[in-house]
Amino acid sequence: MPDTAISETNARSHDVIAEHPRSIGSLLERNPKLSGPEMVKHLVPPRQFEHATFESYRPDDDYPSQAEAVESMKAFAGALKPARGGLFRKRAPETLPGIYLDGGFGVGKTHLLAALWHVATGRKYFGTFIEYTALVGALGYRTAVKLLTGASLLCIDEFELDDPGDTRLMSRLLSELVASGSRIAATSNTPPNALGEGRFAAQDFLREIDALSAQFQTIKIDGVDYRRRAIEGHTVSLSPEEFDEAIAGVSGTITVDSFDDILEHLSNVHPSRYVKLVEGLDAIGVRDVHKLASQTDALRLVAFVDRLYDAQIHVFAEGEPLDSVFAEDMLAGGYRKKYLRATSRMISLTTDDIA
C-alpha cells in the first residue's frame, strides 16, 4: 500500500487528523526500518517492568512456591555474576545454564524474569518468544546467531509450542548460544483457565527442547490468576460520537485508522518492526472493528497487540468489540492460547487509563 493510500472507511479519521495536526497521525504514515543491531537493542523488558526487582515481588503466603521461586531466581542470578576474590575465593554453587518458570498467568513470572535481567551483567537480552523468532525471520538464522552470541543472558518470556517449526528453530538457536556460554531463562505462556486445555507444563517444555532439556532447572509457581477477571471481562467499544470525543481529548500522540487499514499495513511491515511502529505513541484509535476472516491477519494482530501492551498504549475502538474479533473456529484451533492472551491484553488496553 502506498504511504498516502487512505481507504474510504478511514476518511473520517483523517478529517479529525486535519483538525488536530499536532497530536493525531496515522499508522499508515509509519514505515519503520531497523537494522539487526537496532532490533536487538529493543530486546529489553517492557515499560511496566522497567524497575522490577526481586525485592518488589510480593509472594502470596498462601502459595509457598512463589517465595521459593524468588530464592531460586536469586541463586541463578548469583551464578551469573563474575567470581571475585583471590586464590582462595569461595566458589559459587554450580547451577544449570538454564532456568524455566512453570506457571499460569498472574503469578509474577514476567516480573521475576525482568528482575533477573536487571541484575545480570554484560550484554543481555529480554524478549518474548515471538520477538526472537521474528528476529530470526527478519535477519536469517546465521545473522541472528552472530548478533546474539556472546550474550551473558537471554530471557525468553512466553515460550510457545503451538508452532513446531518455530519451537525447533528456538531449540537449535538456544543450543548454540548455551554452547557458547550464554545463560537462558524462560517462562511459559498459557493461562490456567484455558478451558480444560491444561497449561504449558514443564514436561511439555523439556520434551520439545530435547537438545537442551538436561540443562534447564524447572521452577513451578502456583497462585491465583489475577488476569482471570480480565479474560472474563470485555473490551470497551465506543459509539462513533464517543470515539470522536475520546480521541479529541488525548493530549499526547495518537494515531487514528480503520481496522482494515491497520491490518493491511501490518501485512507490509515485518513483525520484528512492530515495536518501532508504535514507538512514541500514547494511544491509538481504531475505527470499524469487525470479526476477522483470515488467520494470517489474526496472528499479525496478536503480534501487534503484544507490542501495544508492552508499551502500555491505550486503545480506543469503534465498531465490533475487539474481544470478539477472533472467530470460534480460530479459538478452537492450535493458536487458541495466542488469541486468549491477545484478548486479555486488548481488554486491559481499552479499559485501563493508560493514555
Image (spheres, helix red, strand yellow):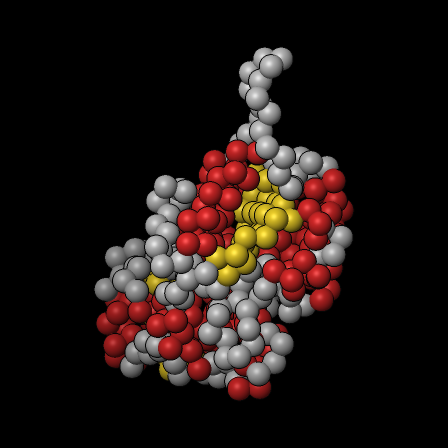
Residue 197 shows in this picture? yes
The x, y position of residue 75, in whole percent, is 52, 38
Q: Which residue appears at 34% of the width and 69% of the height?
A: 350
29 or 50: nearer the eye? 50
182 or 148: nearer the eye? 182
Q: Which residue appears at 74% of the width and 40% of the height?
A: 179
Q: Is residue 103 left or right of residue 151?
A: left
The x, y position of residue 90, in whole percent, is 57, 22
Residue at the extreme top: 87
Residue 338 sits above or below residue 276 on the image: below
> How many marks can you see?
0
Residue 254 shows in this picture? no
156 or 217: nearer the eye? 217
159 or 256: nearer the eye? 159
Residue 254 sits above or below residue 192 on the image: above
Q: Which residue appears at 42% of the width and 70% of the height?
A: 344
Residue at the extreme bottom: 328
The x, y position of residue 320, in whole percent, is 40, 83
Q: Which residue appears at 40% of the width and 58% of the height?
A: 63
Q: Quadrant of residue 128?
A: bottom right
In what quadrant of the picture does the N terminus appear? bottom right
In what quadrant of the picture does the C terminus appear? bottom left
Residue 165 sits above or below residue 242 on the image: above
The x, y position of residue 3, in whole percent, is 53, 63
